[in-house]
Amino acid sequence: MQKVQIQDLNGRELEIKTADRKLMATFIGALDTHRSDLYSEKVRRHLKAAREQGFPARSKVPFGLMKVRNEAGRVVSLGIDPVTGPMARERIDWFLKENLSQTALYHRIRERHPDHTVSDRQVRRWLSSPSLAGRLAWKQDAAKSLLTEVASGQSFPVLITDAEFEAVKVKLAGARTNSGLRGRSVRMLSGLVKCNSCGKGPDS
């Protein structure tokens, strides 16, 4: 409508007003969609193969761990990183033994480990990673940021015991439940008692 010219990456003008040009644009779009679908199928095949063979299939590993490769350069397992491993263990102790909140842990990391800082959101994702407990994970629910396919047994050295990992999950679940109440004044019997005259509760 605005007579805007469309050019490809080589600077050639693309004319899509004619039937032949529209067909060509549709054909190119279909090929690109097909290429994207083929790549998705390839990723799913590799994830399935890694899961069946017990190999890690994630491009990134949690802080404190490192990839272990065989002679051919293929990732076959995970191990504790000699540099970041002790720092990761210290962060877990801060969270559990010193009973720091997620936000307090984030600020402690920025203060004590300035060369290995993470965002507040990444702190929660890192603490909830089953890889810290020595378990491989392959599939993630992007909407909830949760790993949905986790190995039942431990496959490599652990940074955190099963009991500590369960304690971390309980603490994170409690923090998520209470996050909506942060900054609000406490009201007794809220939602439980109503006035006989006006029908309103204590919050009104």
Image (spheres, grey):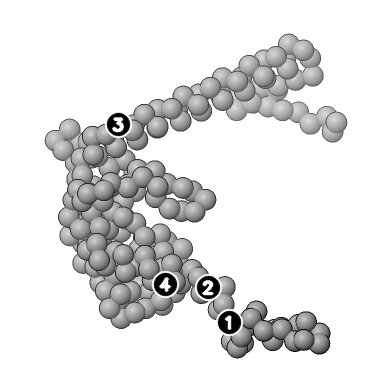
User: Which image quadrant is residue 70 in?
Assistant: top left
Residue under the image location 72 percent in, 28 percent down: 6
Q: Which residue is mark 1?
A: 183
Is residue 59 at least partly visible in the picture?
A: no
Q: Earlier in the sequence, mark 3 or mark 2?
A: 3
- Judging depth in this view, the residue of 49 and 196 nearest the camera is 196
Q: Are marks 4 and 3 in contact (CB under 8 Å)?
A: no
Q: Which residue is mark 2?
A: 179
Image position of 2 (left or right of 184): right
**What x and y, as percent, mark residue 11?**
64, 26
User: Which image quadrant is residue 72 in?
Assistant: top left
Is 196 situated above or below 48?
Answer: below
Question: What amino acid type is highlighted by mark number 2?
Answer: Ser
**What x and y, as percent, mark residue 38?**
46, 24
Image position of 186 (left or right of 73): right
User: Which image quadrant is residue 24 in?
Assistant: top right
Question: What amino acid type is highlighted by mark number 3?
Answer: Ala
Disc marking residue 102: 4
Q: Which residue is mark 3?
A: 49
Image position of 97 (left or right of 2): left
Secondary structure of the residue carrying tag 2 is helix
